[in-house]
Image: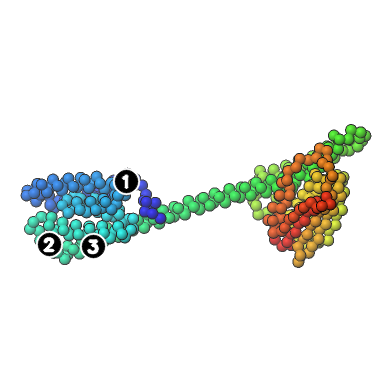
Amino acid sequence: MRPEDYQPPLSWWSTLWRFGLMVALSAVVFVPRLDYQLEHARWWLAADLALGVISYAAVWWRRSYPVAIATFTNIAGLVSATSAGPATLALVSLSTRRRWREIVPQAILSFVCGAVSARYFSEPGTETNTYVDVGVLAAVVGMMVAWGMYIGSRRELLASWQSRAQLAEAEQSAKVASARTAERTRIAREMHDVLAHRISTVNMYAGALAFRDDLPPQQVRETATVIAETSHLALTELREVLGVLREGPGDAAPESPQAGPQDIDALVDDNRNTGMRIEYAATVDFSTLPSAVGRTLYRCVQESLTNARKHAPAATVHVRITGDQESGIDLEVVNALPLAATVLSAPPSGFGLVGLAERVELSGGRESHRKTADNRFILRVWLPWQT
């Protein structure tokens, strides 16, 4: 992380107390020299104040040009006591960057300028202990550097926490968006599975009424009754699916309508009652089949019958379910394809087999379908016994 990335903007209060601290430091160094400068060296007083004003103005660009500002204020501090405040702030600010190649030269320069100023630009006649002055000056410079590095470390830590928080929020938003997409896909698949076989039945009977104008009134009434009952069932199931969407249940437990393998017999009979010819055989003990696999198996049978009704309503559909706990569940659905397109056939969508393949894949199984040379359509699904 670059220093520029974790330097926070200063508020008016932060700016005010920094300015006050600079003035206090400058006063501590400047006041002892003031009397001598007024009485014996007016030029020194003028130079001191001029360099101090320039240092106070330059220090506001310490973040943009840290090395240049620190160098200027340190050199100005040789002659100007009023530059002590800006020089201190510039060195601390530079140290917050925690770059040794910048800190070490400026710390040495600050120490040298301070020692030279104390030796040659102090009030004449002032007796000082050189070793004590050097020790105190080295300690002061070290404290400024340490304080600046501590501030920089703290700023970087806070910036790191903020970055992690933003990243966590972004990841959470992505997870929420992914969950919404998955839920929409699940609802769309559920609506397709629930309604497709009902609508295809309505389409088949309505097509027969439109195509056959020689049916007796009794048969027309029976066909219309089937259409009305199937439409009512479709609306009821659609209402149940939309009710699940409105209530906003969790994803952990499946919601109604949820059918299982024990309902496959009723599904086959229901389709036979609509006029389909189905040869059905199952050698699996559905009572021991896991519920998740059972639901997937039911939807696969439902979609295969819906697909056969849409594209080959007059063909015989052969449905066979075999398997056990060791080998898994095998579903095979075979039906002949019509030689020509049926009148008023349902519009092709292609989403049914796509949704079926997605369900099977999520259950850890395999799905394949193909058209054979003898004009048959074969759908095969394998599901693991445990998911």
| Res 233 visible | no
Q: Is residue 91 left or right of residue 184?
A: left
Distance from Cα at disc 1 to Cα at disc 2? 38 Å
Mark 1 vs mark 2: which is more N-terminal? 1
User: Is disc 2 placed on a helix, strand or loop?
Assistant: loop
Q: Mark 2 = which residue? A: 128
Mark 1 vs mark 3: which is more N-terminal? 1
Q: How would you rate the neighbour count of disc 1 (Cα within 10 Å): few for under 14, some for 14-19, many for 20 or more?
A: few
Label 2 is placed on what type of residue? Answer: Thr
Distance from Cα at disc 1 to Cα at disc 3? 29 Å
Q: How many marks do you count on the picture?
A: 3
Q: Which is nearer the eye, 36 or 277? A: 277
Please name which of the two marks, 1 or 3, marks the residue nearer to the observer.
Answer: 3
Q: Residue at x 80, y 45 (%)?
A: 311
On the rendered image, what quadrant is the C terminus found in? bottom right
Residue 13 disc label = 1
On screen, residue 323 above or below 25: below
Label 3 is placed on what type of residue? Answer: Ala
Please name which of the two marks, 1 or 2, marks the residue nearer to the observer.
Answer: 2
User: Is disc 1 placed on a helix, strand or loop?
Assistant: helix
Q: Mark 3 = which residue? A: 139
